[in-house]
Image (tube, rainbow, N blue to C red):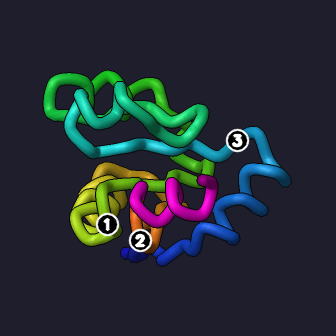
Amino acid sequence: MSTFKHLSINELIHMTAESDLVQIVDIRDEASFNTAHIAGSINLNNENIANIIADADMDAPLVVVCYHGISSQNAANYLIEQGFDDVYSLDGGYSAWSTANA
């Protein structure tokens, strides 16, 4: 069984610039997501996870974002268990992303 990989902010920038296939899921609460999020990301929660898994490309890169890069690691492991092949946890989470893109 594969494991998730850690992804830096710079690696995510390069990855999304090189491919339109990168899927980004943000596991922060809905209010935080609605306030600000990475462009193109989807808010992943308990209510929509089954639909997102059903609609996702299981072979395309999947990046999991949380607040600080901790909770995303558990979510990334869960998504691998659901059949995703290429899963990443964004180091530093949305906090690091927003600082780098301020």
Amino acid at dot 2: Gly
Please tell me in which quadrant of the rendered image residue 7 appears: bottom right
Distance from Cα at disc 3 to Cα at disc 2: 22 Å
Q: Contact, CB < 8 Å: mark 1 with mark 2?
A: yes
**Stretch of the chain drawn in magenta:** 94-102
- Residue holding disc 2: 92
Please name which of the two marks, 3 or 2, marks the residue nearer to the observer: 2
- In percent of the image, x 68 and y 70: which residue is there? 11
Q: Contact, CB < 8 Å: mark 1 with mark 3?
A: no
Q: Contact, CB < 8 Å: mark 3 with mark 2?
A: no
Q: Which comes sooner in the sequence, label 3 or label 2? A: 3
Residue sitting nearer the eye, 100 or 84: 100
Q: Is residue 100 magenta?
A: yes
Distance from Cα at disc 1 to Cα at disc 2: 5 Å
Mark 2 burial class by Cα count in 10 Å: few <14, some 14-19, many 20+: many
Amino acid at dot 1: His
Q: Is residue 37 left or right of residue 66?
A: right
Looking at the rendered structure, the secondary structure element under dot 2 is: loop
User: In the rendering, at what x and y percent does residue 34 appear?
Assistant: 35, 25
- Residue holding disc 3: 21
Residue 86 tag number: none
- Residue holding disc 1: 68
